[in-house]
Amino acid sequence: MAELMCVKCKVALVEEKIELRYLDHSMNVTALRCPECGQVCFSEELVRGKISEVEMTLEDK
Ligand SMILES: [Zn+2]
């Protein structure tokens, strides 16, 4: 996996667990954050996967 850099600071992004809220559900996702400016970069695929997980749980009810 290629290391992602912050375009602004030119430093490598670090992985960080972040709590995300969607439809009264909270989920922990791993996001990439710039240690310099704090800019968070989510993998869009990952977020979409989590959201569909939540939607599936809702449909089960
Ligand atoms: Zn930065």
Image (cartoon, rainbow, N blue to C red):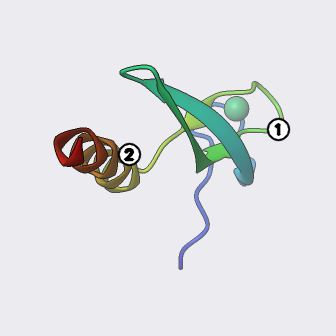
**Which image quarter has ligand 1?**
top right
Rounded to the nearest whole Å, what is the CA distance between mark 1 and mark 2?
21 Å
50 displayed left or right of 56: right
- Disc 2 target residue: 47
The front one of 28 and 3 is: 28
- Disc 1 target residue: 35
35 displayed left or right of 31: right
Q: Residue furthest front?
A: 61
Give the SS element for disc 2: helix
Counting from the top left corner in percent of width and height, residue 43 is at 42, 50
Q: Residue furthest right?
A: 35
Where does the C terminus fall, quadrant-wise? top left
Q: Residue at x 63, y 33 (%)?
A: 19
The front one of 8 and 30 is: 30
Q: Residue at x 74, y 27 (%)?
A: 38
Q: How packed is label 2: few (under 14 Cα within 10 Å), some, or many (20 or more)?
A: some
Closer mark to the observer between disc 1 and disc 2: 2
56 displayed left or right of 6: left
Counting from the top left corner in percent of width and height, residue 16 is at 74, 48
Counting from the top left corner in percent of width and height, residue 6 is at 62, 41
Give the SS element for disc 1: loop
The front one of 17 and 12 is: 17
Counting from the top left corner in percent of width and height, residue 35 is at 82, 38
In this rendering, the answer to whether 51 lies above or below 30 is above
The part of the image, by quadrant, that contains residue 4 is bottom right
Whether the residue under disc 1 has CB within 8 Å of ligand 1: yes
Q: How packed is label 1: few (under 14 Cα within 10 Å), some, or many (20 or more)?
A: some
